[in-house]
């Protein structure tokens, strides 16, 4: 086994996350556009996008025990392999339900990969650098996610081409995982049964419920923006290329401010930064609802919105780590993933429903309202970092 330094381990983990982000960023708009061109309704289109997040929810209650038993590395390797195989199978059969099942498996694989990497990074990062490290995690995921939608126009060359390219890229990143030495999470409390896992979920909820709301909001935002917005944009007269650029604008905005916001959260506190960016994000999406007829102004607005709210998931994980003891980190990370998935399930379903039945309501009004509600909830919650590892 190759003995690698902590720094090298960190960069391998964030690099594989970037590749995962690329595949996710490509899949949502790509399949939305393909299904829209095939005559599938916006509500069914949204339903197909939820498959990935259904997979995450299905596997979540069973994820912590294998992580504690086998360690981080096997869980991440398994997740990466499942994603690679599923991506390679997409061109095999172009049907709604076959693609739904493949997205379900990608959800399971992605969740294993992200749960393993998030928990590993959270556990070996010192508190004073946790915001920075998790913001770099989010930054690399954002870089991958930003480039993913740019693959959508390749569907005009060949429907199979984007899937093949994504699968090969994931395979190239996956092989580097074998250079890592396996480690195990804090074993003060072992998980021997499903009921014990549920008990730990209850403990994690008691300590960190406020930290699970930003991942919920980000899940709704990401999935609806990439799964429902392409349909909405095509119906208001934008073309596929414009949709790709708009999605990339948001993702690039998120990339620009991931690291600065992570560092600021280490200095001024996670709760303060989260409250600020949720409020500003709500304002940006409200403005976008009035600017959607101008491609340039809409691109600028989405870029600025990305700068503010593109870090809500990584900041939510950092905030969770502030609120609970270290031996609950795996459970807390798992619950961040669960709430992200719940938001991701609600996002495209709600978006597709509004696009189909409420044509006079702007897509961006839904998102701005969501962020304002989460902002108010965190404002009213006065608790901050009440738990330390000594507890």
Image (cartoon, rainbow, N blue to C red):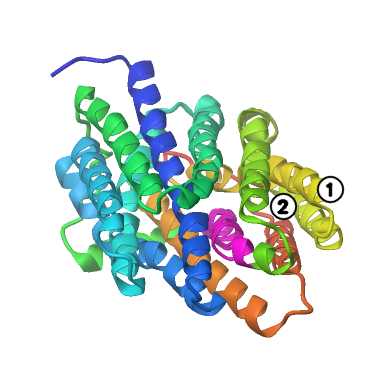
Secondary structure mostly taken by the magenta-highlighted segment of the chain:
helix
Q: Is residue 329 left or right of 354 when viewed as pictured?
A: left
* In this rendering, position of residue 31 left or right of residue 316: left
Q: Which residue is identified by label 1?
A: 297
Q: CA distance from mark 1 to mark 2?
A: 21 Å
Viewer-closest of 37 and 207: 37
Magenta region, residue range: 208-231
Counting residues from the start of the chain, the first of labels 1 and 2 encountered is: 2
Residue 224 counted in the magenta span: yes
Identify the secondary structure beneath mark 2: helix
Task: Choose top left, top right, bottom left or bottom right for residue 173.
Answer: top left
Does residue 261 show up? no
**Numbered disc in front, either 1 or 2:** 1
Q: Quadrant of residue 70?
A: top left
Front-most of residues 53 and 126: 53
Residue located beneath label 2 in the image: 278
Up-down relation of residue 370 to residue 246 (above or below): below
Quarter of image, res 265: top right
Quadrant (top left, top right, bottom left, bottom right) of the C terminus: top left
- Residue 251 in the image, given as x and y percentages of width and height: 61, 42
Q: Position of residue 220 (x, y in %)?
A: 57, 62
Name the image quarter holding the N terminus: top left
User: Residue 148 location, x and y as percent?
Assistant: 49, 43
């Amino acid at each position: 086994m190759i003995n690698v330094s902590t720094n090298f381990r960190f960069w391998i983990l964030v690099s594989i996350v970037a590749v995962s982000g690329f595949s996710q960023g490509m899949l949502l708009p790509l399949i939305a556009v393909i299904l829209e061109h095939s005559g599938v309704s916006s509500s069914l289109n949204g339903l197909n996008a939820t498959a990935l997040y259904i997979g995450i929810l299905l596997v979540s209650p069973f994820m912590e025990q294998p992580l504690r038993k086998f360690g981080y590395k096997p869980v991440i390797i398994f997740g990466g392999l499942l994603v690679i195989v599923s991506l390679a199978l997409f061109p095999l059969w172009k049907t709604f339900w076959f693609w739904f099942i493949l997205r379900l498996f990608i959800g399971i694989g992605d969740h294993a990969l992200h749960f393993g990497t998030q928990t590993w990074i959270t556990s070996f990062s010192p508190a004073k650098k946790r915001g920075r490290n998790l913001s770099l995690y989010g930054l690399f995921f954002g870089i991958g996610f930003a480039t993913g939608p740019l693959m959508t126009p390749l569907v005009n060359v060949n429907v199979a081409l984007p899937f093949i390219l994504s699968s090969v890229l994931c395979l190239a990143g996956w092989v580097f995982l074998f250079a890592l030495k396996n480690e195990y999470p804090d074993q003060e409390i072992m998980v021997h049964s499903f009921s014990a896992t549920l008990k730990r979920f209850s403990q994690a909820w008691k300590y960190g419920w406020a930290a699970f709301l930003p991942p919920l909001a980000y899940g709704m935002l990401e999935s609806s923006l990439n799964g429902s917005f392409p349909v909405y944009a095509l119906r208001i007269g934008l073309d596929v290329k414009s949709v790709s650029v708009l999605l990339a604008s948001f993702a690039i905005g998120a990339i620009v401010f991931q690291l600065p916001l992570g560092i600021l959260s280490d200095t001024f506190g996670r709760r303060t930064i989260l409250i600020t960016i949720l409020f500003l994000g709500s304002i940006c999406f409200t403005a976008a609802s009035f600017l959607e007829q101008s491609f340039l102004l809409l691109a600028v607005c989405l870029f600025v919105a990305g700068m503010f709210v593109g870090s809500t998931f990584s900041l939510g994980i950092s905030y969770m780590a502030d609120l609970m003891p270290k031996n609950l980190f795996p459970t807390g990370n798992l619950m961040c993933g669960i709430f992200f998935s719940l938001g991701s399930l609600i996002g495209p379903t709600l978006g597709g429903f509004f696009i189909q039945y409420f044509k006079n309501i702007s897509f961006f009004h839904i998102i701005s309202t969501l962020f304002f509600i989460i902002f108010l909830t965190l404002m009213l919650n006065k608790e901050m970092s009440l738990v330390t590892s000594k507890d």
